[in-house]
């Protein structure tokens, strides 16, 4: 049974699921189930962009959770899109409707098993700002009173936001293959780390040139396979992520296919984003220019044209041979 009616009705349903009569500040916000709550936001924040929000919940103590709800508060102007996935397809029975804004409420009539992961998508407004914050909390009942996880706040940085790099990550890129129509080119992103600063939520974002398509992870010796990567045929911004911080230095190799229309050159850019303990940080932006195989090629015209093509060189060669033969006949005479 799904409930996606008005926000007021959903609030009442959430309260009913949790068995709440009243919640006062006098109640201590206990967490006897030691429920840990984390959030990861993927996607590039630009005007009208759709981003994915992944919530992860783990339970590290014995009390049985009888009721469960999550409250997420979106930044101003952002809207909810849809719940995209959940562990064992345990989509919350009570969830926001597409286009809802402000506080989003999710609740389960049947409490899912832990650890539990759910991903939903949100849409950015048409006006960009430097950064916004998304925050939320898990509320549950294991006995007679509501209990809560810590409040988790996630900063979403806009395109103009400056990023620190306290971990000292440095990104370079190499490629193997010729840039020709429909050719497959293998790219390898190499990342080094120059400090001992621990990193979390590591995501490599690579932006393909227009018309190029992701074809899969490349089995290059020494490269590391991430825990998540784009779907085949993906275009634009590609994201490669790890559930836990990978070891550095690391190399990630993948294949991409050029379009049928070949330009003189194209550019691929990317950087590795991460967090330490606070706001997001990132490596340098690495840019790689790929020249097509036609660059430097002599577009010579055929014989009779103005480009000095191979046909012209053949005529010159025959003329030279004729002159040599004539000189030899003259010498014998």
Image (cartoon, rainbow, N blue to C red):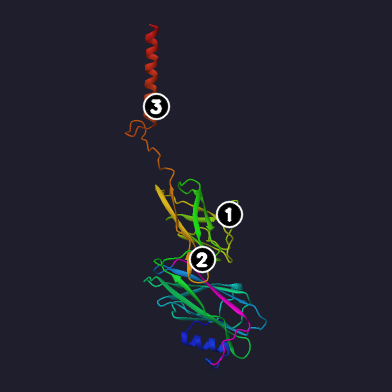
Spatial CA span between label 2 and label 1? 19 Å
Q: Which residue is mark 1?
A: 223
Quadrant where the C terminus lies?
top left
Residue displayed at 50% across by 50% down: 174
Picture quadrant where residue 157 is located: bottom left
- Residue at figure coordinates x 46%, y 84% from the top left: 7
Q: Secondary structure at mark 3?
A: helix
Q: Is residue 210 left or right of residue 33?
A: left
On screen, residue 332 above or below 33: above
Q: Is residue 257 visible?
A: yes
Q: Does any portion of residue 6 appear in the rendered image?
A: no
For this orientation, the residue located farthest to the left is 306
- CA gap, disc 3 to disc 1? 50 Å
Residue that label 2 marks: 274
Residue 266 at x, y percent in the picture: 41, 51
Q: Residues within 10 Å of mark 2 (few under 14, many from 20)?
A: many
- Which secondary structure, mark 2? strand
Q: Which residue is mark 3?
A: 314
Q: Is residue 170 magenta?
A: no
Residue 144 in the figure: left or right of residue 328: right
Residue span colored magenta: 26-44
């Amino acid at each position: 049974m799904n409930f996606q009616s008005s926000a007021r009705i959903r609030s009442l349903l959430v309260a009913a699921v949790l068995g709440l009569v009243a919640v006062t500040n006098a109640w201590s916000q206990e967490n006897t189930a030691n429920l840990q709550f984390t959030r990861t936001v993927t996607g590039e924040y630009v005007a009208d962009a759709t981003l994915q929000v992944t919530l992860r919940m783990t339970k590290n103590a014995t009390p049985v959770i009888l009721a469960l709800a999550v409250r997420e508060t979106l930044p101003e102007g952002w809207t909810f899109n849809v719940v995209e996935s959940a562990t064992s397809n345990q989509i919350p029975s009570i969830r926001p409707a597409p286009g809802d804004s402000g506080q989003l409420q999710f609740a389960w009539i049947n409490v899912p098993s832990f650890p539990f992961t759910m991903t939903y998508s949100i849409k950015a407004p048409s006006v960009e700002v430097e950064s916004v914050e998304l925050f939320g909390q898990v509320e549950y009942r294991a006995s007679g009173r509501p209990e809560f996880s810590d409040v988790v706040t996630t900063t979403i940085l806009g395109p103009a936001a400056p990023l620190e790099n306290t971990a000292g990550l440095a990104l370079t890129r190499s490629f193997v293959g010729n840039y020709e129509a429909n050719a497959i080119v293998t790219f390898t992103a190499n990342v080094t780390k120059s400090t001992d600063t621990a990193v979390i939520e590591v995501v490599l974002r690579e932006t393909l040139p227009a018309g190029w398509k992701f074809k899969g992870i490349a089995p290059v010796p020494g490269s590391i396979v991430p825990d998540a990567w784009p779907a085949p045929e993906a275009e634009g911004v590609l994201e490669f992520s790890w559930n836990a911080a990978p070891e550095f230095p690391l190399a990630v190799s993948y294949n991409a296919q050029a379009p049928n229309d070949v330009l003189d050159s194209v550019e691929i850019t990317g950087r590795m984003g991460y967090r330490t303990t606070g706001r997001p940080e990132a490596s340098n932006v690495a840019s790689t220019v790929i020249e097509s195989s036609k660059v430097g090629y002599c577009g010579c015209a055929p014989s009779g044209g103005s480009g000095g093509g191979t046909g012209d060189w053949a005529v010159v060669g025959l003329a030279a041979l004729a002159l040599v033969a004539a000189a030899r006949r003259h010498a014998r005479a």
